[in-house]
Image: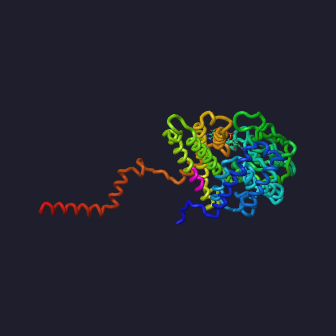
Amino acid sequence: MAWDFETDPEFQKKLDWIEDFMREEVEPLSHLGMAAHGPLGREKFIKPLQDKVKAQGLWACHLGPELGGQGYGQLKLGLMNEKLGRNGLAPTIFGCQAPDTGNAEIIAHYGTDKQKEQYLWPLLNGEIRSAFSMSEPTGGSDPLTFRTRAVLDGDEWVINGEKWYSTNARWAKVLVVYAITDPDAKDPYRRTSIFLVPTDTPGVRIIRNVAVGAGGEIGGGNEGYVEYKDVRVPYDALLGERGAAFVIAQVRLGGGRVHHAMRTVGACKHALDLMCQRAVSRTTRDGRLADLQMVQEQIADSWIALESFRLLVLRTAWLIDKHKDYNMVRKDIAAIKVAMPKVYNDIATKAAHLHGALGVSNEMPFMHMVTSSLVMGIADGPTEVHKVTLAKQVLKDYRPDNDLFPKYHIPRLREEAQEKFSKELSEMKEEYARRARDAASA
Ligand SMILES: Cc1cc2nc3c(=O)[nH]c(=O)nc-3n(C[C@H](O)[C@H](O)[C@H](O)COP(=O)(O)OP(=O)(O)OC[C@H]3O[C@@H](n4cnc5c(N)ncnc54)[C@H](O)[C@@H]3O)c2cc1C
């Protein structure tokens, strides 16, 4: 019987290395801000750390060995990602940053040799970046509202449309673009195809770079609002089959949602650590914050929420390893996608609150965490949509009762039990009658 919550000692050594590396190297670097992100900063600061990760065999661990990863599977990846999740820079340093991970995954699955040569290997080596250009300003939750079109003209596709929140478009070498190619297909989910479009193709223009969160300069963010105007690409810019965009998307989004959830466990743990640290350090005239029962309640509630979420995430990872098919784990993936923003928001908000004015200042990470928790409820589809998926998956195992009263109606269950045990009941009845007679005659 295998039902085990232990980490094997060999892998624990890797986790210990990651823990030290995060504390000693990654976290200090993240405080340099933009200095670490420009082309020179990447060369000077990020690349040496990426090399250390590669030397440890921890680079791009979401991938199988055929693609240069370790083939650890999702459960081990989950334990690693918990550590990476407490710092936004870590995924880049470990070669597993969104949206490149998902983009590489679909190019690996569906790309031609030429596409792999052009984009996959450079992406996996961290030499280029990519963007996923699916959502449109018309509404991202319902992909059937998208309007971007790709029309064949000779042996070229001509793409026209606008995309919204194409993360990292400004840094990307290639854009993974969704466009309608077959508007008359009977199945609406077979109308859209995916194209790999080099960012420097004439007609591709970033209208604006939108930033997440309050403040900051308009136009200074990483979320590309992108225009495609008469963008011409060759026929073989198509990724996978024509009309297969939504099938391909499931491969990409399933993995992505799980990886976000794994990292969110780490982010929640970080918020709880800071909350506890403050609680034992800050005093009022009645003693430490940690000695006040309402504070204790917040810490207890946060711990329970985090540990429950963590188990749900790790079990989902274990199920993916077991089935090797995201579709068979759809319910569980939807569940962690729904749980993630709530748990993160609750813990981050409580942690901010416990730090008082300092907590809501820009000198602490909590406002960023709260914003990130809201993002988790929107990016990759809003919570409501995933609740519907989850509920449908749960309900599909149930069949209707056709009687007026349900089959678990207690009078009916009692009647059935009496029938099932009628022999024993009549034996007992006789025995009681015999004892009564014996007692009367004694
Ligand atoms: C930080 C960030 C990064 C992103 N990165 C990318 C990216 O790289 N590439 C990309 O293509 N997209 C990206 N997105 C876009 C993301 O996928 C969409 O924002 C998301 O699908 C929701 O679409 P929308 O923002 O247009 O909201 P809308 O579709 O307008 O929905 C708004 C709200 O309406 C409600 N709602 C919508 N539909 C339903 C429903 N069926 N039932 C009940 N309520 C509903 C929900 O409350 C929902 O939050 C990113 C978003 C964020 C925030």
Residue 299 pos. (x, y %)? 53, 43
Which quadrant of the view contains residue 382?
A: top right
Which quadrant of the view contains residue 357?
A: top right
Q: Residue at x 65, y 61 (%)?
A: 13
Count of numbered labels shown in the rendering: 0
Q: Is residue 353 visible?
A: yes
Residue 373 pos. (x, y %)? 63, 42
Q: Is residue 296 magenta?
A: no
Q: Quadrant of the C terminus?
A: bottom left
Q: Nearer the viewer, residue 383 or 96?
A: 96
Q: Nearer the viewer, residue 136 or 305?
A: 305
Q: Is residue 311 above or below residue 65?
A: above
Q: Is residue 131 above or below residue 353?
A: below
> Is residue 229 left or right of 215 when viewed as pictured?
right
Residue 65 pos. (x, y %)? 73, 63
Which residue, as the protein is rendered here, is positioned at the far bottom?
1
> Is residue 441 left or right of 138 when viewed as pictured?
left
Q: Is residue 311 magenta?
A: yes
Q: Is residue 243 visible?
A: no
Q: Nearer the viewer, residue 94 or 288?
A: 288
Which quadrant of the view contains residue 430?
A: bottom left
Magenta span covers which residues? 309-315
Q: How is the image coloured?
A: rainbow
Q: Residue at x 58, y 56 (%)?
A: 315
Q: Residue at x 32, y 58 (%)?
A: 418
Quadrant in which ligand 1 is drawn: top right
> Is residue 2 left or right of 442 when viewed as pictured?
right
Residue 441 pos. (x, y %)? 12, 62
> Is residue 396 left or right of 129 when viewed as pictured?
left
Identify the main secondary structure in magenta.
Answer: helix
